[in-house]
Image (cartoon, rainbow, N blue to C red):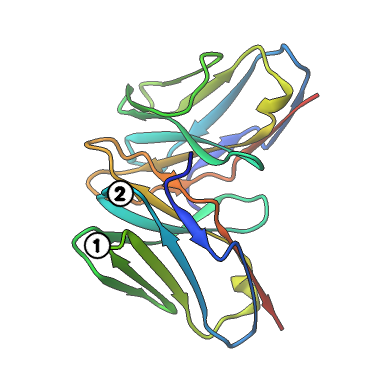
Amino acid sequence: DSGVTQTPKHLITATGQRVTLRCSPRSGDLSVYWYQQSLDQGLQFLIQYYNGEERAKGNILERFSAQQFPDLHSELNLSSLELGDSALYFCASSALPTYEQYFGPGTRLTVT
Amino acid sequence: SQQGEEDPQALSIQEGENATMNCSYKTSINNLQWYRQNSGRGLVHLILIRSNEREKHSGRLRVTLDTSKKSSSLLITASRAADTASYFCATEGGQGAQKLVFGQGTRLTINP
């Protein structure tokens, strides 16, 4: 158990819909990261937050957005969903100055 | 696109044998990390090696880093059935941003 929690575990929704994925980092970790894992693209970094502020952006679509709240939990919002958005979405957290990232169990999103 | 490329893509060995996986990357890095993923589950951090280190050990794991060749290897000694998983290398090279860039992974199967 990494200490990072993600909800829900599974999500099935239709194209065009909007969903919110939630992540609680390990106790004390200020950085939260979101990754997408799909068969064709592999593991892709989406976005990083540090202590509530956006720190780095990767291959995140404009239809996707995220935020980190004062209690350090984070949410990833996916809107206007397309079939290609079906993937595993992972959240990870880390504590500076170390660079190890600890991953949650993931949310499996299926868009039908 | 992925920075890291693992080789081989798949590896099948007998229990008790050693397994070696290689990773190559393209740009300069701050550190390189190896992760394990059991099928469809979250990633587990195995080991981190910094750019000024050449070799690191952790239990049955040995990681080497050659920054001149932009390559790393992960050696698992005395393999066990429980080591069956996908192994990913990930590089961190951003200034101040800790995003990880993952390779496509090596699928390791340990046969009893």
Q: What is the three-letter code of the residue carrying label 2?
A: Tyr
Assign a secondary structure to mark 1: loop
Query: Relative to B81, does residue B86 appear above or below in the rendering?
Result: above
User: Where residue B31 sits in the image (x, y, percent)?
Assistant: 29, 54
Between A75 and B108, the one lying in front of the other is B108
Q: Chain under label 2?
A: A
Residue occupying the point 35% across, 49% down: B26
Q: Chain under label 1?
A: B
Disc assigned to residue B107: none
Residue under label 2, please give it. A99
Residue occupying the point 49% across, 46% down: A103
Position of A90 with respect to A30 (left or right) is right
Both labels 1 and 2 in a single chain:
no
Residue occupying the point 56% across, 18% down: A77
Quarter of the image where the C terminus of chain B is located:
bottom right
Q: What is the three-letter code of the residue carrying label 1?
A: Ser
User: Where residue A14 sits in the image (x, y, percent)?
Assistant: 78, 18
Query: Relative to B2, does residue B14 appear above or below in the rendering?
Result: below
Between B7 and B97, the one lying in front of the other is B7
Assign a secondary structure to mark 2: loop
User: Where residue A95 sits in the image (x, y, percent)?
Assistant: 30, 44
Crowd around label 1: few <14 · some 14–19 · many ≥20 (10 Å): few
User: Where residue A109 sits in the image (x, y, percent)?
Assistant: 69, 31
Residue under label 1, please give it. B68
Q: Which quadrant holds residue B68?
A: bottom left
| Farthest-out residue, left | B52
Query: Relative to B104, does residue B84 appear above or below in the rendering?
Result: below
Q: Which quadrant holds residue B70?
A: bottom left
